[in-house]
Image (cartoon, rainbow, N blue to C red):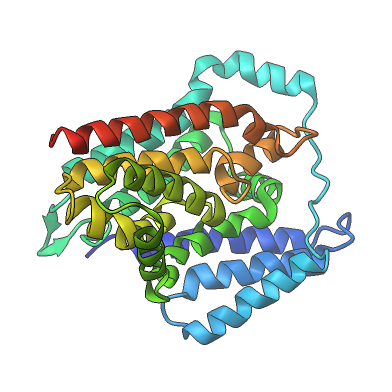
Amino acid sequence: MIFSVEMIYVLMGIIVLGCSLYIFTDRTNSRRLTTGSFYLIYSITLMFGKIIPPFYIGLMVIIMVLIIAGGGLKKSEHVEESITVKEERRKRLGGRLFLPAILIPILTLAGSKLLDGVKIGGKALLDPSNVTMVALGLACLTAIIFAMVMTRGTPTGAVKESRRLLESIGWAVLLPQLLATLGTIYTNAGVGTVVSKAVTAIIPEGSLFWVVVIFCLGMAIFTMIMGNAFAAFPVMAAGIAIPFLINQFDANPNHIAAISMFAGYCGTLMTPMAANFNIVPAALLDLKDKNHVIKVQVPTALAVLAFNIVLMYLLVSLGV
């Protein structure tokens, strides 16, 4: 293949490496050595994760956790441009400021749909194992280049702004990768089997309604624990969806998968573990209450969860 998933991770690692070097040289940060080391290790896992043995990757993750636990991760004091300069740029660029952000979803969708299966010289243009992720990575790179041309910026400026954003996110930058592995770990550990036995012992035999209720609530609760509906789904599918809803009640697997993920997303709205959705926005907006986003979302999440339960029950009971 020409563009692989590994290439995207390496590109991300190079950017994070540049950020760590800037942090190491920032004498205004009293914890620049530990903070820089945190992001340096993170960049190594991104760039060389495919070739470094899992054991040593695990040791690196432990070191990163120890840095966080010991208070070694500190956000640098970034010098902001004056309001006058920002206002001048805003007036000059106007609505074009949003173009780089808009380009990302457009190019990702176009790349994943139009370039899937395209070959050049007998080689796949995008990694067949994950076309969408590669398309997303290339879209982000294109958006960065477009933004630099539009704002007359430089690669150095792009890395500096990446560093500011990365430090604003902080330790939460690790969560998507860590949480993505939990579903597989829990499933291999037999959690799905335990859930299935618990459902058999608690729910009256043949009670479709209570199976649906436990399944949807389980998706939401496991998502709140793991921070990711994709991590919760393998556990709940193995424990409830497949043995009960699909095998016993002959439910449509497509409907079950779609609605269960929607139920899981309700849990996403109510947990700080979904840091990229709930904690990162609060950090970027400098909200005093870091859980404010979650508090606002809880009523909506509960209402949507109740709707999902009713919808799934009706579809399965009607045999749709």
Q: Residue at x 62, y 13 (%)?
A: 91
Residue pictured at 17% horizontal, 60% vertical: 124
Q: Quadrant of the C terminus?
A: top left
Image location (x, y in percent) of residue 158: 59, 45
Q: Position of residue 242 (x, y in %)?
A: 24, 58
The image shows residue 216, relative to residue 309, as above or below, that is below
- Residue at the location (36% across, 44% down)? 210
Q: Nearer the viewer, residue 73 or 315?
A: 315
Q: Residue 197 sits in which quadrant?
A: bottom left
Q: Residue furthest left?
A: 122
From the viewer's perspective, tell me whether residue 48 is left or right of residue 311. right
Closest to the observer, 85 or 188 = 188
- Residue nearest the observer in this picture, 211 or 301: 211
> Going by the image, does 18 lie left or right of 312?
right
Quarter of the picture holding the N terminus: bottom left
Residue 42, how many percent across, how many down? 60, 67
